[in-house]
Image: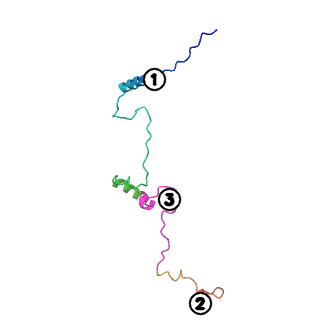
Amino acid sequence: MAGRQKEKVIPDEVHQNQILRELYVKELRTQKLYTQYHVNPLRKVHTITRKPMSWHDNLEEPADARFLNLIHHAAHGPRKKYTETRTESQEIGWDSEPLVVQGDTLEATHSSPGPSDVEPRSSHLR
């Protein structure tokens, strides 16, 4: 048979207040105020990049002349960038000058025919 169970004694409010006060004083004694913060070297840091199209972030960065020259050079076609072809695919359209020079003297050979009996022009119908 089990021993007698003791009834729980409910402490009064004054006793509870004294216990809480002792806890608060103990916490305040051991508490320190840290004002110097640093990054934990053992934790991975995820950097967040800036928005590329925001204008206010790009105001403070000066334009790099070398970088701008590289971008403009890359925008040129391959015939302006290189003196010779780099691949076999470039050889197909590398020399794109026409073989027959079209000018004012050859205008008669490239003129359109006049109206025919089968298909009259709309300018002749008026």
Q: Does the magenta stretch include residue 75?
A: yes
Q: Please give the range of residues in magenta.
A: 74-103
In the image, residue 105 above or below residue 42? below
Estimate the x, y position of residue 91 in percent, counting from the top left.
50, 60
**Quadrant into which the N terminus falls:** top right
Residue shown at 42% from the left, 59% from the top: 81
Estimate the x, y position of residue 11 in percent, counting from the top left.
49, 20
Residue shown at 56% from the left, 82% from the top: 112
Please indicate, yes or no, whether residue 28 appears anywhere in the rendered image. Answer: yes
* SS category of the residue bearing label 3: helix
Of labels 2 and 3, the one closer to you: 2
Mark toward the start of the polypeptide (2 vs 1)? 1
Query: Who is closer to the viewer here, 78 or 20?
Result: 20
Query: Who is closer to the viewer here, 48 or 74?
Result: 48
Mark pair 1, 3: CA separation: 90 Å
Of labels 1 and 3, the one closer to you: 1
Mark pair 2, 1: CA separation: 114 Å
Estimate the x, y position of residue 32 in percent, counting from the top left.
35, 29
Identify the main secondary structure in magenta. loop
Disc number for residue 107: none
In the image, residue 82 above or below residue 12? below
Mark pair 2, 3: CA separation: 48 Å
* SS category of the residue bearing label 1: helix
Tags 1 and 3 touching, CB below 8 Å:
no
Q: Name the residue under label 1.
A: 16
Q: Mark 3 points at which residue?
A: 90
Q: Mark 2 points at which residue?
A: 124
